[in-house]
Amino acid sequence: EVQLVQSGAEVKKPGESLKISCKGSGYSFTSYWIGWVRQMPGKGLEWMGIIYPADSDTTYSPSFQGQVTISADKSISTAYLQWSSLKASDTAMYYCARRSMVEDFDYWGQGTLVTVSS
Amino acid sequence: QSVLTQPPSVSGAPGQRVTISCTGSSSNIGAGYDVHWYQQLPGTAPKLLIYGNNNRPSGVPDRFSGSKSGTSASLAITGLQAEDEADYYCQSYDSSLSGPRFGGGTKLTVL
C-alpha cells in the first residue's frame, strides 16, 4: 500500500527555522516526483515545488522560489520542506503528494499544520 | 492570465446532477495538457478523483466523470449524495509555471 506519512503539527515563532518531513512507503521512492502543496486557512491549494528523490532535481513555483527549500534523503525515503526564517504568513497546512506518470498527484500525505505566531 | 477559474460554489439536491467548470488558458488546458480533479472532504487531505481528463482511479464511483474541450474542463457528478459535500479542485500543468497549477476550488453543497 502506497503511503506518505508527514511529520506532526508545529507551532513556531516568527524568525524561527523549521523542517517538516514526508516519508514514503509501499513503492519505489526514487521512481516518482514528490510535490509540496500549501493550503492557507480557508483557502485553496497552491503548488510550491517538486523534487525527484533519485537525483534531488528540484523545481520551485516562482511564488515560493527563495522562500523555502525542498530536499530529499533517498536512503530513508523521505522528502523535506524547510524554512530558514518563518513569517506569520507561513501559517498553513502543508501537504506532500506523489506525482504519477500522467502528472496528477495520486497519493497525498495527511498534511502538516504549521502555525507561526508570536 | 495563467489561472484556472472555477465557480466558488455549486449546489444540488440529493439525486440531482451537478457540474463544475474549470476554465484555463493557452498555457495550460488550451495547450493540450491533461486536467485532473481532486475531492477534499472537510478536514482531510485532497484525494485524486479524476485523472487524465476523464479517468477514474480504482474505487471512485462512476457517478463522477470528467471532460475537456478547448481551454476548459468539467467535472460532472450524478446521483448526488450527502457524502459528496466537499471542495473540488481542478489541476493542469502550466507552462508559465513549469509546473502544476490548481484551480481556486469549488465548494459543493448538497441541499
Image (cartoon, rainbow, N blue to C red):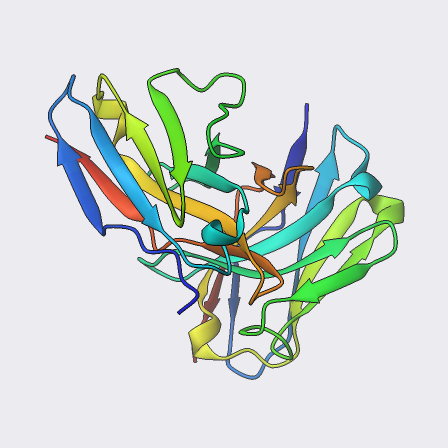
Q: Position of residue B53 (x, y in %)?
A: 48, 34
Quadrant that contains the N terminus of chain B: bottom left
Residue closest to the eye, A33 or A42: A33
Instruction: Name the foreground residue: A117 vs B71.
Output: B71
Residue at the limit of the structure toward the front, as seen here: B70
Q: Could you tell whether A81 is left or right of B14 in the image?
A: right
Image-quadrant location for residue B95: bottom right
Nearest to the observer: residue A61 or residue A26? A61
Residue at point 52% right, 48% down?
A: A111
Total of numbered circles in the picture?
0
Q: Residue at x 82, y 34 (%)?
A: A28
Which residue is depicted at the point 28% across and 25% down?
B77
Q: Residue B85: where, in percent of width, then height?
A: 25, 32
Name the outermost residue toward the bottom: A15
| Side of A49 relative to B38 (left or right) | right
Picture quarter with the C terminus of chain B: top left
Instruction: Give the vertical position of A11 relative to A26 (above or below).
Output: below
- Residue A15, by quadrant, is bottom right
* Vertical order, A64 against A57 (above or below): below
> Could you tell me residue A99's position as x and y percent?
65, 43
Depth order, front residue of A65/A75: A65
